[in-house]
Amino acid sequence: MSSDDAQQGQAPQSSADQAGAADEERTVRVVLVDDHRMFRTGVQAEIGVTERTRVEVVGEAADVDQAVTVITATRPEVVLLDVHLPGGGGVEVLRRSATMMADPERPVRFLALSVSDAAEDVIGVIRGGARGYVTKTITGTDLVNAIFRVADGDAVFSPRLAGFVLDAFASTDAPPVDEALDCLTQREREVLRLIARGYAYKEVGKQLFISVKTVESHVSAVLRKLQLSNRSELTRWAAARRLV
């Protein structure tokens, strides 16, 4: 082809056009960490169609040990991390992944994805190194957008949760230790908050993907540990600590 022919043909792409095309072809590799298999399956179905979402799910884990093993083996760009996990919770996964998060060449970034919207959960994982925190009410489209933003190093929060983080880091005082609350497991705290908000046992089970019998067992444990007699006392106890 002559130079004249070339001039009459399609103009070469600008650097901006080339960057845009490359961005459209970019795929973000993700690991899902959640102890509920059905929830992982749902997230996979929602965001894991790589041709459409440009998200590739490269691994899954149901507890802390599995999470660290899978993350180490796959080195994803983003980990969707549940806060409450067997083996120490999301904070423990973050602690054991500190070296990978700090890798200047291939940093692994974490986005918390949890049913909990409690301030202490949000602040705990952010202090642990997570780049953001969204609740499980998020839409698939918004979750994909959050994944790409976190992969680029941005911080992403569900709207009402951002205030928790701003307040926590604006304060120079360490948060007070609540020994009574600390005696509860992460799952017991989840059940406590939902019960205090007026959820029926069946609704709590549906929210947390556990059976009604398991909910009853957790409530009994909470009442015993906090030395409370009934649900009404539990609700007042939680309200006094601003857990609802």
Image (cartoon, rainbow, N blue to C red):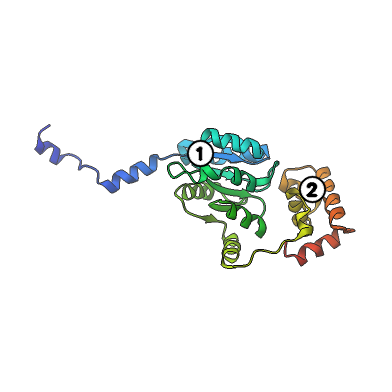
Residue 107 location, x and y as percent?
47, 44
Q: Secondary structure at mark 1?
A: loop
Label 2 crowd bin: few (<14), some (14–19), many (20+), radius 10 Å: some
x 56%, y 41%: residue: 46
x 62%, y 39%: residue: 40
**For the residue marked with disc 1, what is the amino acid?**
Pro
Q: Which image quadrant: the N terminus?
A: top left
Q: Is residue 215 left or right of residue 158?
A: right
Whether residue 198 can be seen here: no
Is residue 89 or residue 28 the one in the foreground? 89
Residue 33 location, x and y as percent?
61, 41
In terms of image quadrants, where is residue 163?
Answer: bottom right
Which mark sits nearer the N-terminus, 1 or 2?
1
**Total numbered labels placed on residues in the image:** 2
x 65%, y 60%: residue: 119
Residue 8 location, x and y as percent?
14, 40
Q: Which image quadrant: the C terminus?
A: bottom right
Residue 234 location, x and y as percent?
83, 60
x 48%, y 36%: residue: 50
Q: Secondary structure at mark 2?
A: helix
Q: Which mark is residue 177?
A: none
The Cα–Cα distance between marks 1 and 2, rounded to whole angstroms, is 36 Å
The residue carrying mark 1 is 76
The residue carrying mark 2 is 202
Q: Is residue 75 left or right of residue 201?
A: left
**For the residue marked with disc 2, what is the amino acid?**
Lys
Can you name the residue that lies furthest to the right here?
A: 229
Label 1 crowd bin: few (<14), some (14–19), many (20+), radius 10 Å: many
Whether residue 236 can be seen here: yes
* Discs 1/2, front: 1
